[in-house]
Image (spheres, grey):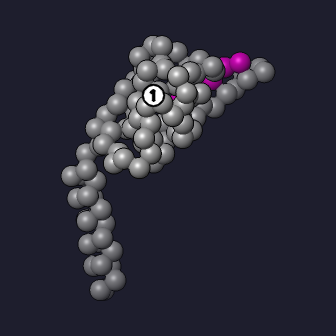
């Protein structure tokens, strides 16, 4: 499978990848990290010769919700979570209102 097989850039992102830490084995050869087409998954390596790795981190701002990483993770540690656009828009509106009130003072 190539990196772009399931991904369609330009579609509205409705869900993003999340990590279940209790299922992740922190492999420095993380297949999900390698297959992500937008490099939304990063992982710090450490230790002697960088043989050990921290948990992968998923950058929600880069994730386009294609799900390729879910299929690539052999331990089932990555899943897709729907984006709550109602709360996102509500928070954005609250921030805008707060900024306006500060300007008026």
- Residue drawn at x 73%, y 23% as measured from the top left: 50
For disc 1, the marked residue is 68
Which of the two residues, 39 or 54, is positioned nearer the viewer here?
Answer: 39
Looking at the picture, how far across and down is residue 36, in whole percent?
53, 33
Looking at the picture, how far across and down is residue 22, in whole percent?
42, 18
Is residue 21 among the parts visible in the rendering? Answer: yes
Looking at the picture, how far across and down is residue 67, in whole percent?
40, 30
Look at the picture and state if 102 lies above or below 88: below
User: Quarter-wise, where is residue 55 in the image?
Assistant: top right
User: Quarter-wise, where is residue 26 in the image?
Assistant: top right
- How many numbered markers are drawn? 1
Look at the picture and state if 76 lies above or below 95: above
- Residue drawn at x 49%, y 20% as measured from the top left: 72
Is residue 19 among the parts visible in the rendering? Answer: no
- Residue drawn at x 54%, y 36% as measured from the top left: 37
User: Quarter-wise, where is residue 31 in the image?
Assistant: top right
Q: Quadrant of the C terminus?
A: bottom left
Per the picture, the main secondary structure of the magenta-coloured stretch is loop
Q: Is residue 63 magenta?
A: no
Which of the two residues, 71 or 94, is positioned nearer the viewer here?
Answer: 71
Look at the picture and state if 27 lies above or below 89: above
Question: Within 10 angstroms of label 1, few (less than 14), some, or many (20 or more) residues?
Answer: many
Which residues are drawn in magenta? 51-56
Looking at the picture, how far across and down is residue 56, in whole percent?
53, 29
Tell me: 99 left or right of 10.
left
| Secondary structure of the residue carrying numbered label 1 | helix
- Residue drawn at x 59%, y 27% as measured from the top left: 34
Residue extending furthest toward the bottom? 104
């Amino acid at each position: 499978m190539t990196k772009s097989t399931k991904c369609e850039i330009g579609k509205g992102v409705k869900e993003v990848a999340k990590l279940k830490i209790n299922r992740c084995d922190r492999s420095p050869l993380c297949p999900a990290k390698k297959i992500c087409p937008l490099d939304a998954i990063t992982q710090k390596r450490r230790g002697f010769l960088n043989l050990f790795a921290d948990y992968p981190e998923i950058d929600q701002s880069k994730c386009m919700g294609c799900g390729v990483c879910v299929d690539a993770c052999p331990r089932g540690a990555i899943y897709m979570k729907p984006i709550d656009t109602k709360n996102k828009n509500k928070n954005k509106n609250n921030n805008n209102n707060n900024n306006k009130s500060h300007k008026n003072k």
